[in-house]
Amino acid sequence: MLRIVRILSLGLLLTCPACQHGRMFRSRFTMNVRCPVCGVIFERDAGEVTGGMAINMTLTSAFALVAGGLLSVFTTLPALLLILAIGMATVTFGLLFYRHARGLWTSILYLTGSIFED
């Protein structure tokens, strides 16, 4: 169990789950094809990026629901302002969490054996 938490933490920190040293991203939105340290391929098959997108969409939607619910109950903001604020916060959260969702998905792939050292 401790190994699973450690590997998932590495994914959230955008560190290679195989060698625990390499960085997963070379720029803000561009993921390395291979780890710069150990050379492991992060996404071997076409379509594996969709798992990270699903994680990002799920957590962003949950964030929007919780934030919208809390703000609607505990504030007296007009509806239009509330919708605009939640919309902007949701888009910002989705963009900022994108890399971490992809890193988390890469860690899940590593734990399931889909990512392995050659």
Image (tube, rainbow, N blue to C red):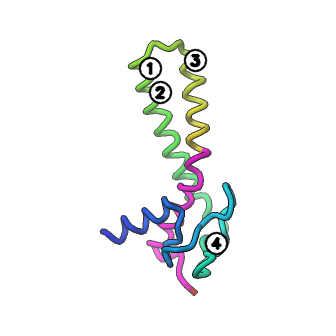
Earlier-in-chain disc, 3 versus 4:
4
In the picture of the structure, the residue carrying the numbered disc 2 is 68
Query: Marks 3 and 4: CB-CB under 8 Å?
Result: no
Q: Using the image, tell me which numbered label, if any, was put on residue 81.
A: 3
Q: Residue flagged by tag 4: what amino acid is it?
A: Asp
Q: Residue at x 61, y 70 (%)?
A: 43
Give the SS element for disc 3: helix
Label 3: how many residues lie within 10 Å, few (<14), some (14-19) or many (20+)?
Answer: few
Q: Establish if 59 lies above or below 88.
A: below
Give the SS element for disc 2: helix
Give the SS element for disc 4: loop
Q: Residue flagged by tag 2: what amino acid is it?
A: Gly
User: x and y percent of residue 83 in the render?
Assistant: 57, 22
39 on left or right of 8:
right
Query: Marks 2 and 1: CB-CB under 8 Å?
Result: yes
Earlier-in-chain disc, 1 versus 3:
1
Q: Residue at x 52, y 42 (%)?
A: 60
Distance, label 2 to label 1, CA atoms, is 6 Å
Q: Residue furthest left?
A: 1
Q: How many labels does the image show?
A: 4
Q: What stretch is highlighted in magenta?
A: 95-117
Q: Quadrant of the N terminus?
A: bottom left
Label 2: how many residues lie within 10 Å, few (<14), some (14-19) or many (20+)?
Answer: some
In the picture of the structure, the residue carrying the numbered disc 1 is 72
